[in-house]
Image (spheres, grey):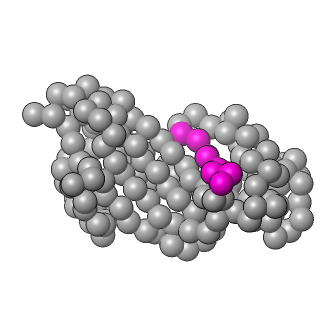
Amino acid sequence: MAFGIEDIKRIYEEEELKFAYEPEYQLIRFSMNIEATSDVRFIARIVNSKTALFTTILPMNIPEKMRKPVSEYLTMVNYELLLGNFQLDFIDGELSYKAVAAFEEDFGLADMTVIRLTYVGFNMFDKYIKGVFAIIYGGKSPEQAFSEINDDDE
């Protein structure tokens, strides 16, 4: 039996998540409040018979004049990441974190892998969105914001 959105649905039900299930689009969506901001959106989607995409989306768009410095900051952040990456849409300012899973059709993904891929974006937003806000609202340069985030780790 092939791995599909129904399998992710089962895992989320076991985790007692509240979500919207859209089998016609092969996706599940929900929102979650995190430490750094509220109402962060999430979509889990089966892209094809061997690929799942887990996307976490900031509930605000990056202002047009701030997209270049924010993208410079995100480039520094992405260089250090091991699982997934931040993406900034320069047209509308949408900021998202995407993680992809490739799997064998007949074996699918382990439950813990789905859980990890679901929460990694929320964890990355909690850690790195403060730098985005420091650039937008605090007048920090990308380098200053990145340095401050890394100083918080120590």
Residue 58 coordinates in the image, percent (x, y) = 57, 63
Residue 87 magenta-highlighted: yes
Left or right? Give the position of 147 relative to 117: right
Q: Is 66 above or below relative to 32?
A: above
Q: Nearer the viewer, residue 11 or 56?
A: 56
* Magenta range: 84-91
Give the side of residue 62 with respect to residue 101, left or right: right
Q: Quadrant of residue 3?
A: top left
Q: Is residue 95 above or below residue 104?
A: below
x%, y% of residue 79?
A: 70, 34
Q: Quadrant of the N terminus?
A: top left
User: Disc count in the image?
Assistant: 0
72 horizontally vs 58: left or right: right
Which residue appears at 26% of the width and 25% of the height? 104
| Residue at figure coordinates x 36%, y 30% from the top left | 102
Q: Residue at x 89, y 54 (%)?
A: 141
How far across and down, in percent of the image, does residue 106 sit? Answer: 17, 28
